[in-house]
Amino acid sequence: GANREAKPEWASSSPANFWKKLSEIVEESQDECTDTYCAAHYKSVHRKGRRAAHHWVGFRARAPVCVICETRVAEKHCDVCNDDLCTPCQVATHLRGKKHKHTFTVIKEPLEEG
């Protein structure tokens, strides 16, 4: 069977808690650059300076890319929309409204620390 992901606990809480958590997710994602590199180019661009502190998660060639931001590897597939999404975009687009009831399958793309 498919891996179904439960909605996070904070997603059903008060609107104030929802916006606070969404703000935290956005802040965390701003600490890293959003450029996409293969391993060799990432290492050459992030060798020194501020970028040297960035964290990179590698992915295979032709890994699915998020259909919303087109900069991050997709981690989830919306079973209703039939879209591949990264976690921040999944949260931003499916947390409220009619889409909050959509189900997701985790994309089993093996990610390696690099």
Image: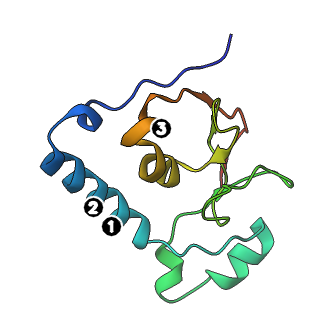
- What is the number of the mark on residue 99? 3
Kindly identify which residue carries mark 2.
23
Q: Secondary structure at mark 1?
A: helix
Please state which amino acid type lies under the numbered disc 1.
Answer: Glu
Mark 1 to mark 2 CA distance (whole Å): 6 Å
Please state which amino acid type lies under the numbered disc 2.
Answer: Ser
Specify few, some or many for label 1: CA neighbours under 10 Å numbering under 14, 14-19, or 20 or more.
few
> Which is in the foreground here, disc 3 or disc 1?
3
- What is the number of the mark on residue 27? 1
Please state which amino acid type lies under the numbered disc 3.
Answer: Lys
Which quadrant is the C terminus positioned in? bottom right
Q: Secondary structure at mark 3?
A: helix
The answer to which of 26 and 98 lies nearer the viewer is 98
Picture layout, residue 2 above or below residue 57: above
Q: Earlier in the sequence, mark 3 or mark 2?
A: 2
Specify few, some or many for label 2: CA neighbours under 10 Å numbering under 14, 14-19, or 20 or more.
few
Q: Please, which residue is most extreme toward the right here?
A: 62
